[in-house]
Amino acid sequence: MTVDLHRILQAHQRTLLAGLDGAREIFENNEAKGDAVEFEWGELIDKFLPSRYRVTPAFVLDCEGERSDFIDIVIHDRHYCPLLFEQGGQKYIPAESVYAVLEVKQELDRGNVIYAAEKAASVRRLKRTSTRIVSLGTAENARPLFEIVSGVLVTKSSWSPAFDEPFKTALRDAATEHTTLDIGCAVRHGGFAVSWENGEPTVAVSEPESSLMFFLLRLFGALQALGTVPAIDLAEYGRSLEA
């Protein structure tokens, strides 16, 4: 006996989209609408991902006290890097804990592609520590640092076709050592995943009716490929307390 996996995923997408649509329709004020949509995206991703991941809007902080720009959605670890600082209602997540950073905007255009890439760069430039861990009684070497996944989430694209050469040109123009975009979703036009080789993007795109599930599955695949975050070196953070 077989099941129609495509139909199941499409039904799940319709349920998830209902929350995003409701957030856009309820609020007339643009700032309130933006906050509501960011919240819905965060809730949607948090419900989809396994419990080993956490989803939080926050700043990212390193052991030298440097911090990122404010990030709409930070996907971070809840096991090896449990520290989450909070001051004045603002959350600060240690850089070692971060798997991915996502920006939420209303529309996919050149400005927002570059904006999301620059937000990601503010996280990727931070210092990350890595120390040994003990697993099943055996000390394991500090694991190498990986590239943090970055992306952008929007309702629609301003381009037609949505992911043709103007989109790829924006990706190229935004790309530096730290500012490449990897993944995203324009709900009305498609999900996308970007692979890079010698500064050139190759873009895989879904059909519009599969945009959300394509994005979520590709996001989870990217997180799986990263494995586990590096174990935070608490001694480095504690140096700020030394006389």
Image (tube, rainbow, N blue to C red):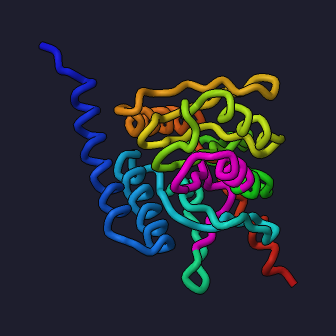
Q: Give the residue displayed 16% in from the left and 15% down from the top.
A: 2
Between 225 and 138, the one lying in front of the other is 225
Decide which of 71, 147 is in the foreground and name it.
71
Judge left or right: residue 6 versus residue 129: left
User: Where does the image place residue 66, in percent across and percent down from the top left?
Assistant: 79, 68
Taking the image as shown, residue 210 lies to the left or right of residue 31, namely left
Q: Is residue 2 above or below residue 153?
A: above
* Residue ranking furthest to the front: 160
Answer yes or no: is residue 141 visible. Answer: no
Closer to us: 225 or 35? 35
Residue 109: image location, x then y, percent: 63, 46
Q: Residue furthest top?
A: 1
Give the residue drawn at x 55%, y 82%. Answer: 89
Which residue is pictured at 58% across the width and 67% down the height? Answer: 58
For residue 96: magenta?
yes
Residue 220 in view in this figure: yes
Q: Does the segment drawn in magenta span residue 203?
A: no
The answer to which of 98 and 136 lies nearer the viewer is 98
Q: Quadrant of residue 181?
A: top right
Task: Tell me the quadrant of the picture where the N terminus can be found.
Answer: top left
The magenta segment is 91-118
Image quadrant where one finds the C terminus:
bottom right
Q: Position of residue 145 (x, y in %)?
A: 73, 42
Q: Residue at x 43, y 55 (%)?
A: 41
